[in-house]
Image (cartoon, coloured by chain):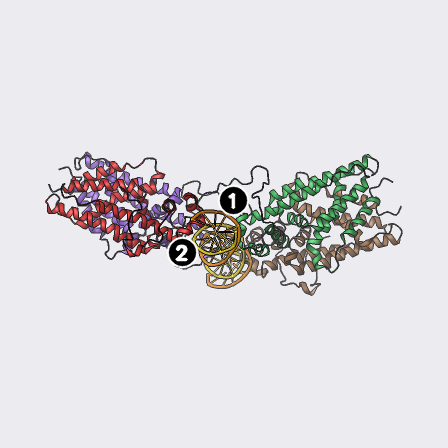
Chain colours: A green, B brown, C purple, D red, E orange, F yellow
Amino acid sequence: MIPEENQTEQTDPRWQRRKEERPGEILKAALECFAESGFAATKLDEIAKRAGVTKGTLYLYFQSKEDIFKSVVREEIVKNIAHVEEIAADESHSSAEILEQMFKFWAQVFLKTRIGAVPKLILSEGKNFPEISRFYLEEVIQRGFRLLGGVLQRGIDRGEFRPLNIENTVKCIIAPVIFSLLWKHSLESHCDKKLDVESLVQTHFDLILNGLSNK
Amino acid sequence: MIPEENQTEQTDPRWQRRKEERPGEILKAALECFAESGFAATKLDEIAKRAGVTKGTLYLYFQSKEDIFKSVVREEIVKNIAHVEEIAADESHSSAEILEQMFKFWAQVFLKTRIGAVPKLILSEGKNFPEISRFYLEEVIQRGFRLLGGVLQRGIDRGEFRPLNIENTVKCIIAPVIFSLLWKHSLESHCDKKLDVESLVQTHFDLILNGLSNK
Amino acid sequence: MIPEENQTEQTDPRWQRRKEERPGEILKAALECFAESGFAATKLDEIAKRAGVTKGTLYLYFQSKEDIFKSVVREEIVKNIAHVEEIAADESHSSAEILEQMFKFWAQVFLKTRIGAVPKLILSEGKNFPEISRFYLEEVIQRGFRLLGGVLQRGIDRGEFRPLNIENTVKCIIAPVIFSLLWKHSLESHCDKKLDVESLVQTHFDLILNGLSNK
Amino acid sequence: MIPEENQTEQTDPRWQRRKEERPGEILKAALECFAESGFAATKLDEIAKRAGVTKGTLYLYFQSKEDIFKSVVREEIVKNIAHVEEIAADESHSSAEILEQMFKFWAQVFLKTRIGAVPKLILSEGKNFPEISRFYLEEVIQRGFRLLGGVLQRGIDRGEFRPLNIENTVKCIIAPVIFSLLWKHSLESHCDKKLDVESLVQTHFDLILNGLSNK
DNA sequence: AATGAATGAGCATTCATTCAT
DNA sequence: GATGAATGAATGCTCATTCAT
């Protein structure tokens, strides 16, 4: 009301921390709500209720609904990045084995943790939060792509894999994981049969390694 | 090839028509808006503006915002179904050829028409519109899965393909198409390099047919 | 929420008109409320109620509570300016007569119209609305001071008045009018005896012309 | 000369003390805030910050925001009254001299101390705090008016002043002091030239004593 | 005494919906 | 049919107030 709009905003490291202690309960509740209903349809009352606090309390830790949203995504993305980097390129195994490990690890991470909701949010709300999209794209997706691409390249160099367009292949490989994740978060609740991700990943790994053809 | 408004009657009682004349302009504008911003963040003012009418006019043709949303999705889904069914099982070609045709056809349809926005909407808003999700799941996804599964089964039966878990394979095969579509609708605008779907589909087809392995 | 904050704001003529037709009812009601309770304590519900509309309607004509406030003040200030300029310097009378006319005219204007509330608002809310204060200062107060100072100077030049510090004298002359106006708008309602402005102005005119001293 | 905290007891039953020890820091900070922003726009956070305590501490000494406001005003008013009464009717000087002394004394008090903010608050918030207005009116304003009126009456009785409407004259005399005070507290910060009160009072005293006319 | 985290009532603002023209 | 002014319920956000520590 009274013009005093000079917050600095996130200037320096793109996503700095705001407080030492941040109630994880609120972020957890918020992630649930946003993943279920999207940004606009999520009510602060609902987040507060699920976090076991009142609406006013949210504003002790966050500046606005948008800030809560960004914080949730950022928090999860940071974990995401950590996971991506955790998958060190293990030189001692064959490329196929490394690939298989990465698959299984990702399937675990994406499906067993709350992180899986983030890609859905990026898809749904990306147009409304361009910085977040850009950040996610650069820090998670492209980084993951490079990692996977490196493994493929090494496999080709070693003669384990036949030469292929790496960029496209990376997307083909990752797609079923994305698919599973979105399925879990959106459609599965309307479907009587659960998706067996372990089995899907197994099939997928076999498929990309050996192809459909009966040779 | 894309059927416009010439379906004789409501195919499913759940989705009956309300009016004879429905301004396609409104639905077109609405699809754009919903795809861009999601249901809740889309304002009727915006739809009206893009459709070149006033807000009041929307209520001549639709009962509510929700009705507009459902109508948009239904309309597109109906076209979707038509497309899926159009891909007749052509007995005269090899299964691989049929598969390739289906791929290319889908890539065309999903990426070159406005239909591609629907899966994004289903994913984003599914939790808020369960009937739509269920309808889409049954009438489009599972129908498509059965169609593709049939082709695979025939390939296996004919000895063209090696035996594989059909259900999983179908998902692995369709996943990159979904991926492309979501990418186009969400992340591509934040990325400097455009996704070349034709090329991706080509790589994908090669990959699933022949696998990675250098045999 | 979605960053699209690029309104141009009042750039060009400092206070341009927003709409051709502006419901004077709203501004009238708003002036009453703001004058009674100040900016912060005024509720939009109250303004709406007094204007005979609902809260939402206010937003058809104004962008915010602050906008309503500024519009009210601006509107009244514009009238104010008109009044100030209306008092043409009449060359045909003695300076004392012109002075008397100005007094009586101002007393009428300030006390018989709603304009009288503006100075109170400027005083009360000036710190919170610096641009308004500055505008009022330049366009009304200093302009009025110059006008009055001109009359005094002419009186001195003609030998009608004795030489005096014009700047100070102007303030001494105008002060009782301001006093009356503030009294009317703030304290009179708590006092059993009404202030007789006509009589006060008469005494004042006599006093400044002839002084207290019994010569 | 300005009495601090040494009044023995509540002079008026309407304004009794609540606590023995009252942190002057809080009241000082509160007066600043209220004078700057008005009652409603002042935040307890701000008062607490300026007083160097936390918000909770305010409630150790005051029952509510309104209580703080009333306490501030009352505190200052009490000082005000003391000042007014301090100006004893000095019989040994001419009425003009007494008048001049009063003027100068008031100018000092109002402008050099924080008391000057009170009249502004009374004007701004009077409608929202009627008891305060009434109290101020009776205990300060009318008392001051009677005092000044007495001096005038004595001057007339002694033949020093010519007969005038005392009630009106009092207001005319006091008005420029009020004007100066409000100017200092509201408009001066938006104006490049500072108001020289000493000089204004000098001119004013000369003016009311001798008038404008060149006799 | 002093704190500051938590509260929740209150208010500005938005926007789907209605209806007189 | 089409309009757009008006509505009012819904909701994000503020801030005076409380209370366990």
Q: Quadrant of residue A15?
A: top right
As drawn, B30 above or below A152: below
Q: Chain of mark 1?
A: C
Residue D202, position as x, y percentages in the image: 22, 37
Asked if one can make out residue C62 in the rendered structure from this viewpoint, the answer is: no
Residue B181, position as x, y percentages in the image: 70, 48
Q: Disc count in the image?
A: 2
As drawn, B173 above or below A146: below
Which of marks 2 and 1 precedes in the sequence? 1
Q: Badge 2, how many Cα within 10 Å: few under 14, some, many 20+?
A: many
Q: Badge 1, how many Cα within 10 Å: few under 14, some, many 20+?
A: few
Q: Read off the residue under disc 2.
A: C47
- Front-most of residues D38 and B166: D38
Amino acid identity at mark 2: Ile
Q: Read off the residue under disc 1.
A: C5
Q: Quadrant of residue D64?
A: bottom left
Give the residue at x 82% y 50%. B98
Asked if one can make out residue D13 in the rendered structure from this viewpoint, the answer is: yes
- The secondary element bearing badge 1 is classed as loop
As drawn, A190 above or below C40: below
- Front-most of residues D138 and D86: D86
- The secondary element bearing badge 2 is classed as helix
Q: Which circle marks residue B140 in the picture?
A: none
Give the residue at x 51% y 43%. C6
Amino acid identity at mark 1: Glu
Q: Is residue D109 left or right of residue E14?
A: left
Quarter of the rendering occupied by the C terminus of chain C: top left
Give the residue at x 55% y 56%. A45
- Say whether mark 2 and mark 1 are on the same chain: yes
Q: Quadrant of residue D95?
A: top left
Q: Chain of mark 2?
A: C
Residue A36, position as x, y percentages in the image: 64, 55
